[in-house]
Image (cartoon, coloured by chain):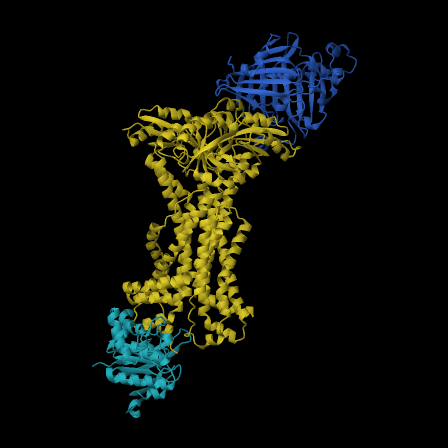
Chain colours: A blue, B yellow, C cyan
């Protein structure tokens, strides 16, 4: 137990890589999105596996062919086609004593995976009201983040973090927050019969290509068979124990895009849990780039 | 042979246990002082270094500026440097709680969102992180404290912690408690962590950081990154490894250390005299024994070896005791030096138990043993050269002790004069060790002429003693005169001890007089508000808002804001004193000693020039008209030196500039002292108490009236010299042991004589008086030669040491008052030292002493 | 008139385990003006006797009286004063203070008694002239011959004109001619000052100057001889 008390020191791994994880401090709201399209974005999309014209239908139209695990994942990655998005979130972080801390925020995003800007603005409780977080992620460029604290009216830049560190007391680690690169993993279909919330799913094993790219030894992902969405995932640590369990529920389709209204991340070893409830989801509402600048960050809403 | 002789030695020791013990103690004290001072020093440095390293966490490099830090843009520059993996800003403030004890608390401002990569905080209550990190960052009143601090003040999470900040008293909310490991060990656990940006705000640091801690890419050599950073950053910033930052501090406290080490050898020198004395007497007393041994066929070299062997064993035992004792003394000495380091230099250190350094122990041991051997050399040689027939003949036909002849006298005088000439004419740039040689020449010369000098003084004293104390006085002084060797060794010990006391005292006194006169001339504001009751706080400052509030009070004519800080300069540091120059010049009559006063009055307020302190000019050879370049965090600042003024603010030498100029270049608007000038007719004391009322419980500030301020500065000077005062006490103590030893020897040597006096009708009281008077006579002779030696050494300290160590030119004052004051003290000490020997003399068995044959 | 010296049943033992009986039940009476020589081999108790008489040592048992004053009733300071004023002492090794000249040595007891230096030295000078050292007064003991030193010591012993003079082998360190001189001097002084003399000696010739010889062995009186004529009278 004591071992976990310790807040990490940097391990041998290097948190900076050529394609920087979108670490998004505080973009918790971002997570369900990412996870809904599979918590990851490609940084270097492969043209061959990224046909713009390809549709999701084929996955279900050839039921007799065993589906290719990678193809399924590509579908997940491509499912969000929006130009911008906005939603509200209520986040509950429950510690192991059962104490729940709740926060509310508004999430806005402009652009698509690999070239996006996000702005998170906290609205509740009063201690954090007005705190803003701006992230700019562009492929090939290390992501940049700024945070604004109204009490001292300061914008600060946030430096890249160690991936296995828990993000601000939630059950998400920095790695979980980041855009995951499709090609960093090898995928293997290992099951087609698991039911999740009454839906048939594919169970896919994701193994890192190189072990220094992730804290996890491997993960199991459950993708709903009739829509490209990861609804459940288990991440295993180096010793093969479950480190974290992800669960997305209340799937909803808004403007043709699937999104989970309830996302849960659990850390079994510590008995903690973070739950996100999403509301007021809107896509393509015409957000402008000047709403995602440092000046905009400083402006109270 | 040696074994047989060692039996003789052992018997001798057994018979003269007290004397042997005292001789050992003489060496032991000398050794212990040396060892304690060095141990205290290394412990302090180790503690400072450890503090730095613990605060640095796993950082491989640090970027540091002067004391006032550097603008935060530097952070982006550092982060964008290739090979830098993590770079995190740090601010360190030693703040004070607003609890009744106003305990100090080291507040470390770090960017918690990134910092945990570098530093380890182990939170307790099985928390793995700060309770609510978002709230922690969002609220500037958030603070994390260490468990020991929490326990000491009965604090728990979500409790309020009042601290004095630059904006006055502020309540902080405890958002986490970390364990006393890693960073929590620093400063005795009196540690708190807060967000660096909040710290900037709360402690009025503008947009500056004190430091950037960074971790380099393990695949890139640190040197490469270090070089890249140096190339990119302004020259006023330093890129250094945490481990080597200790050296910088070592450099800062160098003046203190060098002074201490030099003076600690004095104690050993006094010990040398004690040993010399003991052995001379021992040889004298064992005249007959030596004769017998020689008659039995012991060769002369073996006699010499016997005595040297004795000296070696005494030296080794004494040194051993000295090292052990010194280690215990070091505990206290460490406290003192840490106190000085924090009071004078503003370095906060974590209290540590003394570090035992084997090499120091061995060195001190060797020094003690060697001293003992050197001291015993002459007596041992005398023993070996003894004519055995003469020695056996009759113990009463003792050879009259040789009084030194003219050639030796001349040689001694020559040494003294050449030492003085060196001091007078040598330049200060030849190196401290060489210059220390000058004083060695003088001391050597004094030692050579000492027996004769002591004789002369004693002869001059004879009629006085006879007149004042009757036959006992006469007998006492005669005893001295007839035994010049025995006497002059003790007088020598006393001379060295008193020389040290007089010259250190005179130096301190001269320095204090000088500072006093200087303050009387230049310190002319009515009231002063300071951030610390120590010389200054390196990290805690006032904001301009406070100064403006004070300025708006009724009765205030004008306030001036002083920033007193240190900047890197030529591989060392220089003090920078910034003030509103127009106001400052208005209050000074003719401050510029060298250079154009009118020009200085015109250019300085416009920021178009510097004036420098005299000692800055001496230290760095900077003259009026030179262009002086200082490296500021925003780039180099170069201005002409318009004038040189007298200033003793820092031994590093001060550069004066206008406050606005400093603020522009250093982006630092902090204030260390607020000088308040009142309107005519406003009562200082009344205004002070009003101001105190206004600031009470709101702002940590110390308010002094003009007189109080001067007294406060003087007490700081006293504090700086605390260790010297302690060494003075040790020197006197060692010299007192010398007196005890000499008198015990004198009494045992004169058993027969005392017996005769008793036999022909001398009362016990008369014998006691005689011994006591002998001590008084020794003390007086010691005082006279000590005063002479002290005057010479004062000359050295003022002419050479002060100039080298601080560049100060201190006028020479003969320490007359000090000598007069110390006279009765020394006499009383001598009387106290004589108490035991006197009792021996009184208790003497007369019949045995006379020894009928 | 009381006896000058009276020892009644005096014993003096040394040591706890191996007790040495230096004096055993010793009786001695010396009349005013009498000259007594104590003779005996080494260890017969002569020195112990002298120490007891001058109050430097105390008897284990028995009573010692000087002019009727019982020594054991006096404290150390009173005994010292008595010694200073009533008893002159002359030693075999002279025991002059080497740092003082002849005159200072002689005047020392007076000065220890509180007399001013001028008066003390005036009286010292008279005595030194009397013992024949008028020209050597300013010399340090080292510069004096053995005889001169002993004369100085005698002068010092007589500075108070004490009724009792104790002499411990006064000629022991001198050649026979010088020794004779000293014995003559003592004889003269005895006549002049009517001093009682207790002389400890090995020298039969010296003893012959006395009125009575007490021969000792093992701490007791072996026998006493009363001389009808002293050595000096025989010579004459």
Which of the 4 image quadrants contains residue A140?
Answer: top right
Observer-nearest of B813 and B727: B813
Residue B478: give x, y in percent of width and height. Answer: 35, 67
Is residue B120 visible in this depiction of the protein? Answer: no
Classify residue B398 as left or right of residue C131.
right
Residue A148 lies left or right of residue B406; in this view the side is right
Where residue B813 appears, x then y in whole percent? 37, 48
The residue located at (36%, 50%) in the rendering is: B814
In the image, taking residue A120 as reference, residue B27 lies left or right, namely left
Number of marks drawn: 0
Query: How far from the left and from the top, in percent, is residue C110?
Result: 26, 72
* Residue closest to the eye, A244 or B655: B655
**Front residue (pair B32, A196):** B32
In the rendered view, tell whether residue C94 sits above or below residue B383: below
Give the farthest residue toward the right.
A65
In the picture, which quadrant includes the N terminus of chain A?
top right
Residue A72 vs B743, above or below: the answer is above
Q: Quadrant of residue C67?
A: bottom left
Q: Is residue B413 above or below residue B216?
A: below
The answer to whether any part of residue B370 appears in the image is yes
**Residue closer to the observer: C5 or A144:** A144
Q: Residue furthest left?
A: C1
List x then y, in percent, for residue B707. 32, 36
């Amino acid at each position: 137990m004591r071992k976990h008390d310790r807040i990490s020191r940097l391990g041998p791994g290097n948190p900076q890589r050529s394609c920087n994880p979108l670490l998004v401090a505080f973009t918790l709201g971002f997570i369900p999105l990412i996870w809904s399209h599979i918590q990851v974005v490609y940084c270097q999309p492969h043209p061959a596996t990224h046909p713009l014209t390809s549709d999701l239908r084929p996955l279900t139209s050839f039921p007799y062919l065993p589906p290719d695990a990678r193809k399924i994942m590509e579908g997940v990655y491509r499912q969000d086609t929006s130009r911008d998005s906005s939603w509200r979130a209520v986040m509950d972080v429950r510690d192991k004593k059962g104490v729940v801390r709740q926060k509310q925020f508004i999430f806005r995003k402009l652009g698509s995976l690999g070239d996006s800007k996000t702005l998170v603005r906290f609205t509740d409780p009063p201690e954090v009201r007005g705190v803003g977080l701006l992230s700019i992620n562009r492929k090939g460029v290390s992501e940049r983040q700024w945070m604004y604290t109204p009490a001292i009216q300061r914008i600060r830049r946030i430096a890249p973090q160690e991936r296995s560190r828990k993000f601000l007391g939630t059950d998400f680690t920095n790695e979980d927050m980041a855009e995951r690169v499709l090609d960093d993993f090898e995928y293997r279909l290992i099951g087609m019969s698991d039911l999740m919330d009454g839906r048939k799913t594919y169970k896919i094993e994701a193994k890192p290509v190189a072990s220094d790219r992730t804290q996890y030894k491997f993960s199991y992902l459950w993708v709903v068979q009739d829509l490209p969405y990861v609804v459940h995932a288990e991440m295993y640590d180096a010793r093969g124990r479950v480190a974290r369990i992800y669960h997305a529920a209340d799937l909803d389709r808004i403007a043709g895009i699937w999104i989970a209204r309830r996302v849960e991340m659990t850390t079994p070893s510590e008995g903690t849990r973070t739950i996100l409830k999403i509301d007021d989801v809107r896509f393509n509402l015409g957000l402008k780039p000047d709403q995602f600048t440092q000046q905009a960050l400083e402006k109270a809403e | 042979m040696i074994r047989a002789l060692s039996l003789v030695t052992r018997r001798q020791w057994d018979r003269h246990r007290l004397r042997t013990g005292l001789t050992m103690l003489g060496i032991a004290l000398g050794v212990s002082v040396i060892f304690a001072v060095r141990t205290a020093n290394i412990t302090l440095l180790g503690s400072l270094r450890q503090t730095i390293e613990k605060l640095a966490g796993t950082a491989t490099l640090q970027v540091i500026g002067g004391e006032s830090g550097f603008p935060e843009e530097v952070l982006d520059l550092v982060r964008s440097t290739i090979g830098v993996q993590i770079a995190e800003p740090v601010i360190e403030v030693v703040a004070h709680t607003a609890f009744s004890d106003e305990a100090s608390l080291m507040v470390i401002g770090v960017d918690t969102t990134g910092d945990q990569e570098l530093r380890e905080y182990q939170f307790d209550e099985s928390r793995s992180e700060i309770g609510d990190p978002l709230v922690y960052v969002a609220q500037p009143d958030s603070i994390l404290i260490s468990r020991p601090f929490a326990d000491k003040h009965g604090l728990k999470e979500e409790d309020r912690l009042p601290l004095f900040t630059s904006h006055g008293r502020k309540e902080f909310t405890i958002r986490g408690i970390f364990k006393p490991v890693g960073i929590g060990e620093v400063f005795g656990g009196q540690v708190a962590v807060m967000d660096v940006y909040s710290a900037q705000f709360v402690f009025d640091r503008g947009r500056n950081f004190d430091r950037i801690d960074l971790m380099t890419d393990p695949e890139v050599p640190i040197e490469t990154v270090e070089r890249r950073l140096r190339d990119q950053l302004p020259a006023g910033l330093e890129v250094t490894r945490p481990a080597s930052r200790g050296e910088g501090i070592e450099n800062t406290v160098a003046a203190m250390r060098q002074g201490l080490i030099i003076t600690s050898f004095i104690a050993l020198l006094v010990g040398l005299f004690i040993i010399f004395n003991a052995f001379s007497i021992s040889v004298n007393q064992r005249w007959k024994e030596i004769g017998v041994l020689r008659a039995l066929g012991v060769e002369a070299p073996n006699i010499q070896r016997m005595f040297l062997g004795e000296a070696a064993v005494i030296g080794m035992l004494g040194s051993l005791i000295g090292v052990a004792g010194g280690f215990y003394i070091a505990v206290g000495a460490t406290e003192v030096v840490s106190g000085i380091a924090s009071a004078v230099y503003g370095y906060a250190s974590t209290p540590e138990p003394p570090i035992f350094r084997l090499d120091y122990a061995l060195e001190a041991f060797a020094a003690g043993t060697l001293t003992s051997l050197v001291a015993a050399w002459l007596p041992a040689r005398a023993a070996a050269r003894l004519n055995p027939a003469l020695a056996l003949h009759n113990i009463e036909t003792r050879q009259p002790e040789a009084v030194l002849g003219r050639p030796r006298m001349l040689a001694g005088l020559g040494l003294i004069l050449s030492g003085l000439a060196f001091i007078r004419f040598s330049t200060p740039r030849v190196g401290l060790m060489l210059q220390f040689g000058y004083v060695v020449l003088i001391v050597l010369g004094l030692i050579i002429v000492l027996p004769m000098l002591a004789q002369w003084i004693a002869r001059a004293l004879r009629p006085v003693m006879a007149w004042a104390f009757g036959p006992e006085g006469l007998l006492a002084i005669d005893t001295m005169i007839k035994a010049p060797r025995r006497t002059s060794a003790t007088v020598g010990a006393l001379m060295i001890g008193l020389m040290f006391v007089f010259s250190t005292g005179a130096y301190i006194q001269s320095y204090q007089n000088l500072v006093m006169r200087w303050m009387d001339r230049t310190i002319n504001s009515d009231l002063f508000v300071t951030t610390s009751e120590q010389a200054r706080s390196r990290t805690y400052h006032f904001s301009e808002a406070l100064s403006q509030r004070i300025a708006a009070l009724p009765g205030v004519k004008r306030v001036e804001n002083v920033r007193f800080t240190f900047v890197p300069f030529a591989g060392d540091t220089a003090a920078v004193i910034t003030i509103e120059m127009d106001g400052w010049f208005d209050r000074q009559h003719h401050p510029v000693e060298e250079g154009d006063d009118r020009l200085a009055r015109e250019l300085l307020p416009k920021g178009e020039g510097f004036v420098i302190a005299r000692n800055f000019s001496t230290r760095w050879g900077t003259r009026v008209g030179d262009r002086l370049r200082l490296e500021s965090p925003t780039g180099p600042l170069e201005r002409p030196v318009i004038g040189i003024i007298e200033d003793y603010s820092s031994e590093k030498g001060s550069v004066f500039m206008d406050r606005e100029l400093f603020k522009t270049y250093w982006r630092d608007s902090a204030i260390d002292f607020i000088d308040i000038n009142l309107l005519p007719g406003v009562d200082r004391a009344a205004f002070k108490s009003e101001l105190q009322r206004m600031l009470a419980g709101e702002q940590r500030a110390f308010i002094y009236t003009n007189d109080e301020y001067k007294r406060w500065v003087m007490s700081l000077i006293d504090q700086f010299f605390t260790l010297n005062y302690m060494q003075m006490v040790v020197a006197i103590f060692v010299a007192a042991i010398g007196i005890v030893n000499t008198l015990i020897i004198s009494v045992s040597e004169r058993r027969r004589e005392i017996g005769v006096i008793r036999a022909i009708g001398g009362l016990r009281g008369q014998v006691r008086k005689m011994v006591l008077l002998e001590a008084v006579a020794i003390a007086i002779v010691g005082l006279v030669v000590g005063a002479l030696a002290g005057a010479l050494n004062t000359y050295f300290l003022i002419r050479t040491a002060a100039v080298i160590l601080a560049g100060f030119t201190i006028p020479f004052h003969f320490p007359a008052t000090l000598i007069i004051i110390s006279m009765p003290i020394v006499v009383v000490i001598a009387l106290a030292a004589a108490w035991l020997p006197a009792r021996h003399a009184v208790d003497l068995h007369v019949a045995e002493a006379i020894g009928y044959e | 008139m009381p006896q000058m010296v009276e020892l009644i049943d005096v014993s003096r033992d040394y040591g706890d385990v191996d007790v040495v009986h230096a004096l055993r039940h010793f009786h001695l009476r010396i009349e005013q003006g009498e000259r007594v020589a104590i003779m005996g081999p080494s260890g017969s108790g002569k020195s112990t006797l002298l120490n007891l008489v001058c109050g430097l040592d105390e008897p284990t048992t028995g009573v010692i009286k000087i002019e009727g004053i019982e020594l054991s009733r006096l404290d150390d300071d009173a005994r010292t004063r008595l010694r200073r004023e009533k008893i002159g002492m002359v030693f075999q090794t002279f025991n002059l203070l080497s740092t003082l000249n002849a005159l200072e040595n002689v005047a020392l007891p007076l000065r220890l008694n509180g007399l001013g230096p001028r008066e003390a030295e005036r009286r010292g000078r008279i005595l030194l002239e009397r013992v024949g050292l008028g020209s050597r007064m300013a010399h340090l003991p080292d510069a004096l011959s053995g005889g001169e030193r002993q004369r100085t010591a005698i002068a010092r012993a007589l500075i108070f004109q004490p009724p009792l003079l104790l002499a411990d082998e006064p000629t022991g360190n001198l050649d026979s001619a010088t020794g004779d001189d000293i014995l003559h001097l003592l004889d003269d002084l005895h006549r002049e000052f009517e001093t009682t003399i207790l002389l400890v000696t090995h020298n039969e010739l010296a003893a012959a100057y006395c009125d009575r010889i007490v021969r000792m062995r093992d701490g007791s009186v072996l026998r006493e001889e009363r001389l009808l004529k002293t050595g000096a009278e025989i010579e004459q």
